[in-house]
């Protein structure tokens, strides 16, 4: 800091709408994400589920039907689109560093996603305790309907 210079709290001067845009990506820098939410981070409920994938990765997931998730990669060959169980969504994982980014499901109205806030640069601002959900026994029709209603629009830049 320059002697005699004052510091300014940029966060206090930036309108709230700008603070609802979040950037992030994987650890090695290959995958990049932009997340736009309609509410501040602390007001967005986080989720976790009881599936074996989530139990082994401990993600803190967020979805905002009024928001938007965008993802792109420097090298898409290093992005694993992992499918398991019902095979109705892709779990985006970096093949180089192993970071789980999001789950994306193709729907008739376009891609929808739920995002792991642990991949965001400002992850510490998401302070709610994840609510645990058990989707075991859910039919594919109910699962897709739930995603269409609750997951957020997604743009995959390939």
Image (cartoon, grey):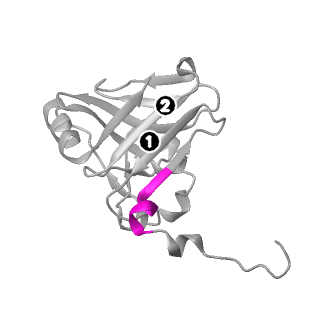
Badge 1 element: helix
6 left or right of 60 in image: right
Q: Which residue is mark 1?
A: 54
Q: Is residue 22 above or below residue 143?
A: below
Q: Nearer the viewer, residue 157 or 124?
A: 157
Question: Which quadrant of the structure image shows residue 21?
Answer: bottom left
Kindly tell me whether residue 129 is visible in this rendering: no
Q: Residue at x 53, y 28 (%)?
A: 73
Q: Which mark is residue 72?
A: 2
Badge 2 element: strand
Q: Residue at x 52, y 24 (%)?
A: 79
Question: Which quadrant of the structure image shows residue 96?
Answer: top right
Q: Residue at x 39, y 29 (%)?
A: 156
Q: Position of residue 10 (x, y in %)?
A: 58, 70
Quadrant of the rendering where the C terminus is positioned: top left
Q: CA distance from mark 2 to mark 1?
A: 23 Å
116 left or right of 95 in image: left
* Residue 27 is inside the magenta segment: no
Judge the density around disc 1: few (<14), some (14-19), many (≥20) Cα neighbours within 10 Å: some
Highlighted range, magenta: 15-22
Q: Main secondary structure of the magenta part?
A: helix
155 left or right of 99 in image: left
Q: Position of residue 49 (x, y in %)?
A: 36, 47
């Amino acid at each position: 800091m320059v002697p005699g210079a004052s510091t300014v709290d940029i966060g206090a001067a930036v309108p709230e709408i700008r603070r609802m845009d979040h950037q992030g990506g994987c650890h090695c820098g290959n995958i990049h994400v932009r997340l736009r939410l309609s509410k501040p981070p602390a007001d967005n409920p986080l989720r976790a589920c009881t599936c074996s994938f989530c139990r082994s990765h401990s993600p803190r997931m967020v979805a905002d039907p009024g928001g938007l998730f965008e993802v792109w990669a420097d090298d898409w060959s290093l992005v694993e689109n992992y499918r398991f169980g019902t095979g109705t969504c892709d779990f985006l994982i970096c093949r180089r560093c192993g970071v789980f980014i999001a789950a994306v499901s193709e729907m008739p109205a376009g891609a929808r996603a739920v995002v792991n806030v642990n991949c965001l640069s400002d992850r510490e601002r998401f302070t709610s305790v994840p609510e645990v959900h058990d989707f075991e026994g859910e039919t594919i029709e109910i699962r897709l309907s739930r995603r269409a209603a609750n997951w957020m629009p997604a743009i995959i830049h390939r």
